[in-house]
Amino acid sequence: MISTLVRTIFVPFAAICFVVPLALAQQSPPAAPPATATAAAPKSVAASVGVFAYPSQKQSPEQQSKDEGECYAWAKQQTGVDPAAPAPAAQPAQQASSQPSGARLKGAARGAAAGAVIGEVANDDAGKGAAVGATAGVVAGGHQARQAKKESQQAAADSAKQAQAAANDTFKKSMSACLQGRGYTVQ
């Protein structure tokens, strides 16, 4: 009776706890909605990178366009940053992913220990319970390892985005300094 009870409760419980989250973790994310058409493109080079220059010494629109182009090139040369170029791809965490973490082995050990206790209590067969528990533990350990790897990759991508944003801010400051030196009010 107890072994029947264990089979009717433990097996579905193990499936819900270990197999379902594993299946959900392997699903691909939903597709992004299509991009909508944007408004008219910015008129000037400076505005395209988020720098807004106003002529304070009655410069002509042609002179402002020329100055913005020259300041863009100067800021690019000084900072080594080109906001028009695509951002570099994030470097994957090579060292962490190349070495096994032992998460599956640890999960198997925890599962075997729990399974042995349940197997002994349920039907005086600790070996069978340990085998079932070890199998469930391997699955859970693998899920935890994949989750940790995913979080590590996300952190690396976030770090790369922050570095790119800082580089773009440096570029904007450099371009602003150039335009101010040529008699523009910059916002």
Image: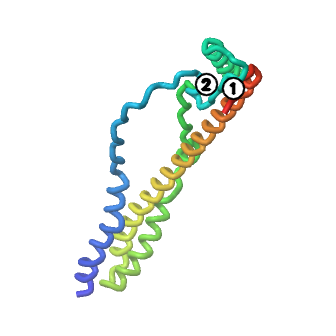
* Residue name at image x 37 percent, y 31 percent: 37
The quarter of the displayed image where residue 173 is located? top right
Image: 139 above or below 97: below
Label 1 or label 2, whichever comes before in sequence order? 2
Q: Is residue 65 left or right of residue 120?
A: right
Q: Secondary structure at mark 2?
A: helix
Most foreground residue, 45 or 19: 45
Q: Nearer the viewer, residue 124 or 180?
A: 180
The image quadrant that residue 10 belongs to is bottom left
Q: Which mark is residue 48?
A: none
Eyeballing the image, is 183 above or below 13?
A: above
Residue type at mark 2: give it: Ala
What residue is shown at x 46% (from left), y 68% (from top)? 109
Disc tally is 2
Q: Label 1 vs label 2: CA separation?
A: 8 Å
> Mark number for residue 46?
2
> Where's residue 182, x and y in %?
74, 19
Residue 154 in the image, given as x and y percentages of width and height? 52, 48
**In terms of image quadrants, where is residue 179?**
top right
Q: Can you say which quadrant of the picture contains the N terminus? A: bottom left
Image quadrant holding the C terminus, namely top right
**Dot 1 and dot 2 residues touching (CB under 8 Å):** yes
Query: Secondary structure beneath disc 1?
Result: helix
* Residue that badge 1 annotates: 175
Q: Residue at x 36, y 65 (%)?
A: 18
